[in-house]
Image: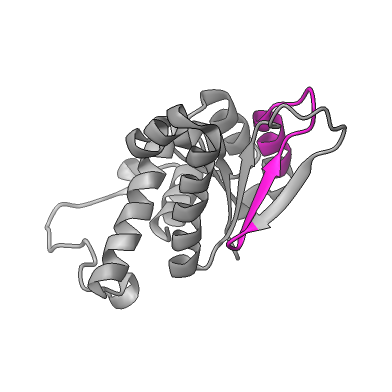
Amino acid sequence: MSVHIIVDGYNVIRQSPDMGLLDRQALQLGREALVDKLAAYKRLKGYKITVVFDGAGEAGLFESQDREKGILIKFSRHGETADAVIKRMAALEKQKALVVSSDREVIDFSASQGASTIGAVEFEDKMEMAAFMDLKGIDPESGVDDGWGFTTQKKGPSKRLPKKKRLNKKRLKKL
């Protein structure tokens, strides 16, 4: 199953110290920095990525969208928030969606629709780690560190996470 990453654009920009600084200078600079990072991540991982922004103050009746560097960029229509667009996409994509936002309302709704969720700061860390691993020439699929060590501690069903959380953890591990 292919993953579709849906990014709450301004939320991610304003959670990041680097992109937030550019955003305070000019909105366009912050958007360009985010799209550049997402494009680099897409080149490494190959996932379908859509970034959603609030509708740029245009009086258009329809959503506008553009594609730049392989990233689909959507602006919400007049009178609609980016959060509403993200919720609609999450409801449509269901388990294929991975929603990137730190907005509690968006995260809760997306999770209720079966989508995986990740916070903006955590996703930015994953993007930076992927870029670092690419720079160093490390293949994340090589299995150098499986994260498992020998232990005699028993794990029974009482220690097991609920099914939804296990599925979410499995999807996030692929990032």
47 relative to 125 in the view: left or right: right
Q: Quadrant of residue 24?
A: top left
Eyeballing the image, is 69 above or below 99? below
Q: Quadrant of residue 83 in the image?
A: top right
Whether residue 127 sits left or right of residue 146 in the image: it is right
Color scheme of the displayed model: one colour
User: Is residue 135 or residue 58 the one in the foreground?
Assistant: 58
Q: Position of residue 79 (x, y in %)?
A: 78, 22
Q: Quadrant of the N terminus?
A: bottom right
Classify 142 as above or below 71: below
Q: Quadrant of residue 68?
A: bottom right
x and y percent of residue 40 in the render?
44, 62
**Residue 15 sits inside the magenta stretch:** no
The magenta segment: 68-89
Residue at 30% across / 43% down in the picture?
A: 159
Q: Residue at x 33, y 41 (%)?
A: 158
Question: Closest to the observer: 172 or 61?
Answer: 61
Count every numbered label the image shows and give the total.
0
Q: Give x and y (percent) for residue 97.
A: 61, 50
> Relative to 17, is 94 above or below?
below
- Give x and y (percent) for residue 112: 62, 35
Depth order, front residue of 125/145: 125
- Residue at the front extreme, as displayed: 25
Q: Is residue 86 left or right of residue 174?
A: right
What residue is at 12 percent from the left and 58 percent from the top? 151
Q: Residue at x 71, y 36 (%)?
A: 85
Q: Look at the image and tell me in which quarter the C terminus lies.
A: bottom left
Decide if residue 163 is in sight here: no
Q: Is residue 75 magenta?
A: yes
